[in-house]
Amino acid sequence: MCGIYGIIRANRDVYEKELTLMGKKLAHRGPDDEGKYLQGGVGLGHKRLSIIDVSNGKQPMTNEDGSVWIVFNGCVYNYLEIRQELIQKGHKMKTYSDTEVIIHAYEEFGKDCVHRFNGMFSFVIWDTNKQEVFAARDRFGVKPFYYTISETEFVFASEIKAILEYNPSLRQVNEKGMKDYMVFQYTLGNKTLFKEITKLEPGHHMTIKLNDTLQYNVEQYWDFNFDYDMYHTEDYFVDKVRFLLEDAVKIRLRSDVPLGSHLSGGLDSSTVACFAASLLDGIELQTFTGGFKESKDYDETHYAKLVSDEIGAENHVIYPTASDFAKSIHEIIYYLDEPGAGPGVFPQYMVSKLARENVTVVLGGQGGDEIFGGYARYLVAYLEESLKGAIMETADRSQFVATLSSIIPNLNLLQSYQPMLQHFFKDGLFGPQDERYFRLVDRSEGMKGIFHQDLFQQANHGYSVFNEFQTIFNKSNAQSYLDKMLYFDVKASLPALLHVEDRTSMAAGLESRLPLLDYRLIELVAQIPPVIKFQGGKSKNILKKAVRNHVPDEIINRKDKMGFPVPLNEWYHSELNGFIKEILLDDRAKNRGLYNINEVEKTLNQQSKFSRVMWGMLCLELWFREFID
């Protein structure tokens, strides 16, 4: 796990001091080592957190004759298997690092090398013979990659702040990105909140030809499809998921430094921790948990203790406070580069710091909700499709009720989701699916009146957030509403959560590995028919059955899914009230011209709860202060 950065220029040299300037902003990502490559118009930089082959994995790294150079951030978990294959093909290996494996895989397979990597990665390869740059990012976007490009210059880095340090003139707001943020509290596609800075999207790679000018091309190399397997039974899928889960955890345990696991007490992190403990051959697993003492509604530590006791792990617990929030929120925004998609970033940051005091690598359960269907909103889609099936299969009312009851035996679950159902079916049943899901995930309603209406006018002309949403939502070949929801969440909201995962871990100099985001798992789960995947309206049906006898039943059968809630409401009415109002109502906020201050003040004084609207305003204002002012 590292930080990469660099400058590629046409007809002009790159100087070491320019790379040094960028590298200083990424020091937290690589506290163990740093290196640079400079040759004419090519400059590559690397900050290293040593994980695999600690002694010999220094970067930038080259092949035997110095014709191919690489800077790489992440980990290729199946590097040992690829290494053996490359040796059999005649390649000579000097190290046991996954970085060298990427170099030789590129030599052997060209840009198709990315299809062989199972891991999290962003890397840049400079091919001196072709005078060409090849850059790639992993399938889910676990590792970040940002760049800005013109006809004569390509600048890239693991974090936006390094690019801004090189070129401060890029501190300009992206109006289209801001429109996205007001709806979702993250940006769609390759956009960032900075006008001229772009993301290389997950599952994409790019080539840049170095001539008198730079010619570049971005391509998608991976996606997943919903080609349903109608020939196998549920038991078959359960066995396959269990096998892949175990293997995904096993290859992520490869490390030359101390390793542990996040443990929230939820199903996903418990699954990872239980499988990891069983594979460590008697080595005690260290687990890391965060909780809040304000109320049991915010605390899952008793579930985490139940799991850690069951697997014989040493469980470390931290209880963040309102004071911790006030002290750390500014630096959290700094490390994020862009506002965070939800208050969970705060406890995640605190738990990462706790973990780093004990280990260098930590496993986590991120991605389970998106892949296996863990959010309550998926139940709404399942309900609609169940209604469709019941209507089509029955002729009279009594038969309809009987059929529907057989489809959803736990129909009483829906009672707790009435507000969501009312919002979802506001314009009637079976309307356009994309419109109704957009309403469900749209967070902009509470923002109305908060921002001046004449802001971001350029984005208002010819740009529609809904059209961008539609493009992603309707892109897959999914036939079921549930899978269309899953596809959008994997492609849009999950990268926003992974952005938080990367920044909170790397801010502490910690490598975070996510077994549930093994691409083999989602390719399998996408083939499972929805009637099996979400059988009877049971969230994560396949995952729960796959991990039974591995994870305690108390965790599998839990009804009170939390998702790391933060007691900001309690804090807002006590210790943080003055802190939040001071930020959102002071002269800097008033003079910015961004907010309708009267509406902001009304929101802060009249709303009884600390809402996602307040969170969005707080993060945005702190972001403006850190990166735009």
Image: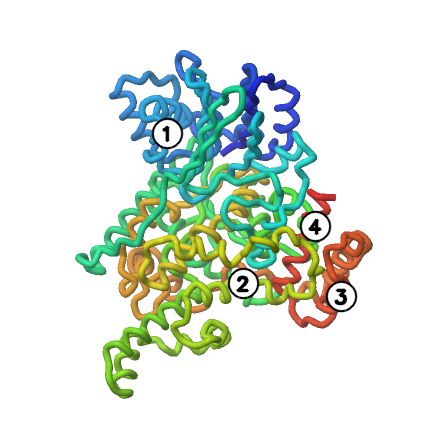
* Residue 588 showing in the rendered view: yes
Tell me which corner region of the image, top left, top right, bottom left or bottom right, holds residue 87: top left
Q: Is residue 139 left or right of residue 407?
A: right
Q: Residue at x 59, y 67 (%)?
A: 295
Cβ–Cβ under 8 Å for marks 1 and 2: no
With 96 as the anchor, is 20 left or right in this view? right
Front position in the image: 375 or 53: 375
Name which of mark 4 and mark 1 comes first in the sequence. Answer: 1
* Mark 1 / mark 2, whichever is N-terminal: 1
Residue 308 visible here: no
**Kind of residue at badge 1:** Lys
Other-residue count near label 3 (Cα within 10 Å), few / some / many at <14 / 14–19 / ≥20:
some
Q: In x, y percent, where is residue 597?
A: 76, 62
Give the amino acid type for the residue marked by disc 2 in the picture. Asp
> In this figure, which residue is indicated by the disc labeled 1?
111
Look at the picture and state if 446 lies above or below 370.
Answer: below
Residue nearest the viewer, comparing 232 with 488:
488
Marks 2, 3: nearer the viewer: 2
- Give the secondary structure at mark 1: helix
Place of residue 5 in the rendered image (x, y in percent of width and height, measured from the top left) = 56, 29
Q: Amino acid at mark 4?
A: Leu
Which amino acid lies under the numbered mark 3 shown in the image of this protein? Glu
Q: Which mark is residue 442?
A: 2
Q: Earlier in the sequence, mark 1 or mark 3?
A: 1
**Residue that protrudes farthest toward the top in the picture:** 65
Foreground of the two, 386 or 130: 130
Which residue, given by chain and number where applicable, does mark 4 sit on? Answer: 622
Q: Secondary structure at mark 2?
A: loop
- Distance from disc 2 to disc 4, alpha carbons, whole Å, reads 22 Å
Colour mapping used in the image: rainbow
Q: Say which residue label 3 marks.
A: 601
